[in-house]
Amino acid sequence: MKQTSMTIRQEVPADYRAVESLVRDAFWNVYRPGCMEHFVLHCLRQDPAFVPDLALVLEQDGRLIGQFAAVRADAALDDGSVLPVLNVGPLCIAPEMQRQGLGRLLLDTALQKAAERGFGAAVLEGDPAFYGPSGFVPGKTVGIRYADDPEADYFLVKELRPGFLRGKHGIYRDPAGYFVCLTRPQEFADFEAQFPAK
Ligand SMILES: CC(C)(COP(=O)(O)OP(=O)(O)OC[C@H]1O[C@@H](n2cnc3c(N)ncnc32)[C@H](O)[C@@H]1OP(=O)(O)O)[C@@H](O)C(=O)NCCC(=O)NCCS
């Protein structure tokens, strides 16, 4: 059997365009016609909330096949305080490499690093079928509701530090950095035009 080597490491500037192409390929037509996530990631890297040391790539035999990124965010608690959390995304695996356990490997590795870095909880919008086995539960079941859709089953949270969410109640809004395609449409169009037509 052929031996393969799998590496998870922090992305470096030389990876940026390849990572954006990977994100574009993986998200294309999944949640909407085309996708925006490659531009979102491109812009997030300049966002003060971005966490560079949690911007990870997964390589197999030197080939880029997955990426993980995340930003600092806050939940607004009912008592008026803010709860710092880590907002996960985008995260993807190359289309032809999906459903082989690689997404789980990358996610769990990144969350472990996030916990070591001191983050108390991670949040995201995603499919519970994928994120549930990694410990994510609907935010509404632990008192943190998604502002745009308080009953959402797809707004998920995971404690990275045991007890971090205990007794906490509040709402969560997506960080502004995820809406760049709406706020900067011409820049998005110019950026998208740099990639091969699909
Ligand atoms: C979501 C994604 C990162 C998952 O990575 P992956 O390597 O395909 O997932 P894994 O093989 O690690 O999946 C582990 C388990 O999660 C569940 N799962 C993964 N993808 C799923 C999907 N699309 N639908 C339902 N369950 C899914 C399954 O239970 C799977 O185990 P199984 O294959 O034995 O049934 C990948 O499919 C992807 O890049 N998708 C496009 C971009 C995207 O949607 N990113 C996430 C945005 S929130």
Image: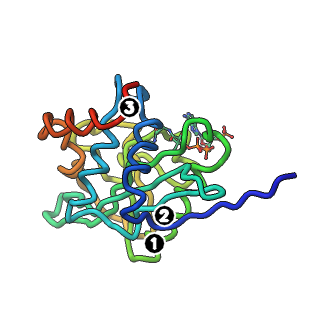
**Residue pictured at 44% horizontal, 49% vertical:** 91
Which is more toward the observer, 80 or 190?
Answer: 190
Q: Quick check: marks 2 and 3 in contact, CB under 8 Å?
A: no
| In the rendered image, the vertical position of residue 129 relative to residue 83, given as above or below | above
Of the two numbered discs 2 and 3 on the same chain, state the one appearing first in sequence: 2
Q: Residues within 10 Å of mark 3 (few under 14, many from 20)?
A: few
Image quarter of residue 181: top left
| Amino acid type at mark 1 | Ala
**Residue pictured at 24% horizontal, 39% vertical:** 191
**Residue pictured at 43% horizontal, 28% vertical:** 30
| Amino acid type at mark 3 | Pro
Left or right: where 22 falls relative to 76: right
Q: Quick check: marks 2 and 1 in contact, CB under 8 Å?
A: yes
Which is more toward the observer, 43 or 76?
Answer: 43
| Amino acid type at mark 2 | Leu
State the residue position of label 2.
111
Q: Residues within 10 Å of mark 2 (few under 14, many from 20)?
A: many
State the residue position of label 1.
115
Q: Residues within 10 Å of mark 1 (few under 14, many from 20)?
A: some
State the residue position of label 3.
196
Across and down, in percent, residue 155 comes to 37, 43
As helix, strand or loop, the secondary structure at mark 2 comes to helix
